[in-house]
Amino acid sequence: MRILSAISHDIKLQFKHGFYYAYLLISTVYIAVLQFLPVEYREAANIALTFSDPGVLGFFFIGGLVLLEKGQNILDSLFVTPLSASEYILSKTASLSVLSLGSSIFIHSSVFGFGTHSGLFACGVLFTSFFFTMIGLGLAVRCETLNGFFFLSSLSTFVFVLPLFEVAGIWSSPLFYALPSRASFMLLGSAFTDLQQWELIYAISVLLLWNGAAYLWARHSLQTFITLKLGGGDTR
């Protein structure tokens, strides 16, 4: 299948640029940090680390990948290839999520082992990675430089990381429940605390809605700033 070939190509490209080696090193450092933390802080620290680094790594990596492809004029020919805009987005999102999931599971299992809710934890990582990768892609195609991307990303993602204050016990607000990151923290935290049925339904529903919106945003951005600018083509 075309999409599987695209995902395989993207994973090979990530290997070539050292993404996997970098995150093997980073994950090992995180494991050491978690092991040295007092036991009472490890769970909250693991949730925060999983969200803010392995879970969100796709957001920053997609910026570098898209800008690299723009610099090499790879995206200039995207609209004349069989690969559609939707397949391009799904390929980038899926391939980076493989890296996110592998890194997160490696860190979590090395410190805490495999729990009874590992599936929900993995869903939390994937939903979080999907969302931030697609948001990052939508921003990256609008930028010409990494500096511009980092500037826009710092402005646009600040609100999404606010629930981190709740995990740290600093600030809590019912408004956080409108954010996808609040739902992500619930699924990531299910590795340590059982979720009630309404919490599970809420978390899955909110993340599905936000991921759908992120996909539409990424596709619109790709069509507007790449496909249509270069002369149209397949925008499915």
Image: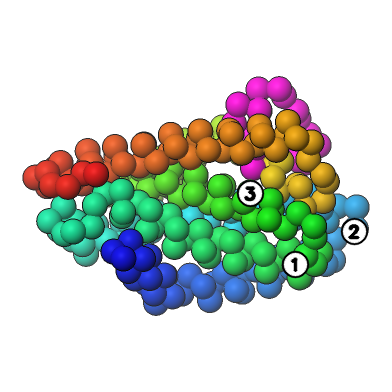
Q: Label 1 sits on what residue type?
A: Ser
Most extreme residue toward the top is 174
Residue, x 66% and y 28% (percent of image)? 177
Q: In what element is the residue under mark 3?
A: helix
Q: CA distance from mark 1 to mark 3?
A: 15 Å
Q: CA distance from mark 3 to mark 2?
A: 25 Å
Residue behind mark 2: 38
Question: Residue 37's image quarter?
Answer: bottom right
Tell me if 51 is positioned left or right of 67 in this view: right
Is the stretch drawn in magenta largely helix, strand or loop? helix
- What percent of the width, then of the height, locates residue 42? 83, 56
Residues packed near mark 2 inside 10 Å, few (<14), some (14 to 19) or many (20 plus): few
- What percent of the width, then of the height, locates residue 16? 39, 77
Query: What range of the chain is rendered magenta?
Result: 162-184
Residue behind mark 3: 124
Mark earlier in primary sequence (1, 3): 1
Most extreme residue toward the left is 231
Q: Are marks 3 and 2 in contact (CB under 8 Å)?
A: no
Q: Which mark is residue 169?
A: none
Q: In what element is the residue under mark 1?
A: helix
